[in-house]
Amino acid sequence: MRKFIVLLLFSMVTACAFGQTDYQDVVYLKNGSIIRGMIVEQVPNVSLKIETSDGSVFVYELAQVEKITKEPRKVPQGTRANAAREGAHYRGIVDVGGQIGAGTHGMDRLSLNIINGVQINPYFSIGLGTGLRLYTGESAAVIPLFADFRTTFIRDKTTPYLAVGIGYSFDASNSLRSLGFLLNPSAGIQFGLSDKIAMHVGLSYEMQRMDFVRVDHLYNGYYGTYPSFTAYTANSGALGLVVGISF
C-alpha cells in the first residue's frame, strides 16, 4: 500500500503554479477612444507609441490622452480552455473511456486518466498522468504512469486535437508488480464550455505490453495428466471511446 501511495502522489502532485494575471497597457483618449496593447515608446510630456495585439502601432500626443492604466488582458469566452491565452499556464485533464480488445492479445478495459500539466503555447501542452485500467474479462486492475503530449489545431472554442500518452504500468492486482510499456494515442474534437473549462470527445487506441502464458501440450505423468506452459511477452491492444474535461 505504501508503494502504491508513493507512485500515485508522485504522478498527481506537480510543481505547476497558476500563472500570474496577464496585464496590458490601456490608453484612454479625450475623444472617448480606448487603445489596448503595449506602450513601446514614450517621450515625457510630448507623445507615446502603443502597439496593439494585431501588430498595429499608433502614436498620440500626450495632449490627446485622458489617462493611461494597466488592466488585466481580457480573454474571449471559451478560448482559455482552448489554449488561446498567451503564456504558459496550468492545465488539468480528467477523462474516462471504454475500450474493446483488438488483435490476438487484445482485452476489453475501462480507463481513467488524471493529468496535471502545463499549456506551453496556444497549441501544445505537456503533462504527467496516472489513473486506472480495469480489465473486465480478467478482473484485473492496472495503474499507469505516463507523460501526456497534446496539440490543438485551431485557436477557437471548437478544435480538433491529437494526444499521446507514453509510459509504464503496474499491476495493482499483484502488489504493483511491473507490467510493461504503455502507448495510448487518441484524436477527436475539443469544445470550449467556458473561459476555463473545455470538454473533449475522441477515439483512442491503447497498447499495453504484458506477460502471457501459453499452454503448449499435455503430458501424462504417474499421478495424472499435466499441462506444459510457456511464458512470453506480447502487446495487448484495444480500441475505444474517450470523454473528458480540461480546466
Image (cartoon, rainbow, N blue to C red):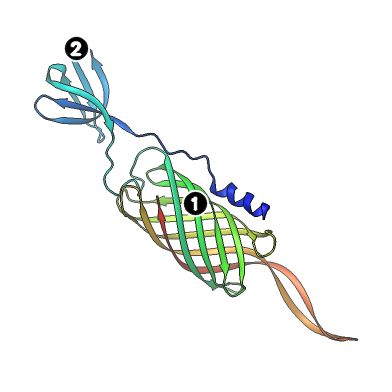
Q: Which image quarter is the N terminus in? A: bottom right
Q: Is mark 2 on a helix, strand or loop?
A: loop
Tag 2: Cα neighbours inside 10 Å, few (<14), some, or many (≥20)?
A: few
Q: What residue type is labelled 1?
A: Ile
The residue that mark 2 highlights is 45
Depth check, front residue: 37 or 197 = 197
Task: Count up the numbered dots.
Answer: 2
Q: What residue type is labelled 2?
A: Asn
Q: Is residue 56 above or below residue 171?
A: above
Q: Is residue 242 above or below residue 82?
A: below
**In x, y percent, where is residue 132?**
56, 61
Label 1–label 2 contact, CB within 8 A: no
Q: Residue 115 carries which label?
A: 1
Q: In the picture, residue 183 is in which quadrant? A: bottom right
Q: Which residue is drawn at 77% across and 75% down?
A: 229
Mark 1 and mark 2 lie on one chain; the one further toward the N terminus is 2
Q: Which residue is drawn at 76% across and 79% down?
A: 216
In the picture as drawn, the residue positioned furthest to the front comes out as 1
Q: In the picture, residue 74 is in which quadrant? A: top left
**In x, y percent, where is residue 151?**
42, 50
Left or right of 48 on screen, residue 21: right
